[in-house]
Amino acid sequence: MGCNEAVLGSNTGFFASKTAILDSKTTAFEARTPRFDSGTAKHDSNANVSDSRPLNHSIIPPGRGPENKREEETHMARIKTRPDELRDQLNTASLAATAAGLAWPATAPTPAAITAAATAINTSLTSIATTEGTLATQRQTRDTNVTTGRGIMTDVDEATDFLYGADGAQKVNFGLPPKGSGSIDPLVKLTDIRTSDGIPAQSIFFDWENIQGATYEVVWATNSTFTTVIGTAVSTQSEYTITGLTAGTQYWMRVRPVRGGQFGPWSDPATRVAPA
């Protein structure tokens, strides 16, 4: 019996020792746990620092991913850009939205708002057409008046030749330099070249500075080297409207002064896309 008690006491001491070792390991594990938490906190801190930095271009903001971009490009491809076509598209959409009735989403543009946008575009188109029509008429009237005025000044020039002679100094009083005075403008290279949409449709208006007593040779082509010349013309005015062009095609134009069989140098090319 005494021997058994001794063994039991020995085993009890053994288990107590094991318990102490286990407690020691538990304490060591708990001691390491704050280090893990500290590392986690450090990681969180770094995450906060990273969030405060500027976004990298490779990071796609919410709502702007590839799918959204593709959807936006699809919208742009299907929505008209020409004013008259967009107006018609808006009118069609307004009729369809009206027909949808209560099924038409409350957050979508109302039929009235769609119609208003179409009307605004149409008003602008009408105003432009009216202005361009008036401008074309005014140009024709001006050209007629200029032709008449030049004819009259030619008669005045001949009358002063008869009265004072072609070289008479008195011609200056009539706004005419004496023919032998050498004061006529030389046939220089034209530099003030301007283009704009012409009248009628599919035309380009082309003008430049005036040179006294000169007419002008105009050439237009579909390339800047003028190896593909589309047309030529002679203008008595310092302007010309090139008509019969193809809408959406880019054209190059140049001009040179001509007087008495003498030719000035060609201007630098001017370019413009023919309007619809």
Image (tube, rainbow, N blue to C red):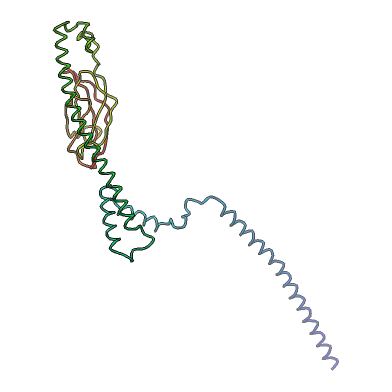
Q: How many marks?
A: 0
Front position in the image: 139 or 211 = 139
Q: Quadrant of residue 188?
A: top left
Q: Is residue 195 above or below residue 121?
A: above
Q: Residue furthest right?
A: 2
Indicate the quadrant containing the N terminus: top left, top right, bottom left or bottom right: bottom right
Q: Residue at x 26, y 26 (%)?
A: 208
Q: Is residue 121 above or below residue 225?
A: below
Q: Is residue 205 left or right of residue 42?
A: left
Q: Residue at x 26, y 44 (%)?
A: 125
Q: Is residue 257 left or right of residue 10?
A: left
Indicate the quadrant containing the C terminus: top left, top right, bottom left or bottom right: top left
Give the percent coordinates (x, y) of residue 259.
18, 18
Q: Is residue 110 left or right of residue 252?
A: right
Q: Quadrant of residue 126?
A: top left
Give the percent coordinates (x, y) of residue 122.
27, 47
Q: Quadrant of residue 20?
A: bottom right
Q: Residue furthest bottom?
A: 1
Q: Residue at x 43, y 57 (%)?
A: 65
Give the percent coordinates (x, y) of residue 184.
23, 14
Front position in the image: 271 or 175 = 175
Front position in the image: 78 or 84 = 84
Give the percent coordinates (x, y) of residue 192.
29, 26
Q: Residue at x 39, y 55 (%)?
A: 69
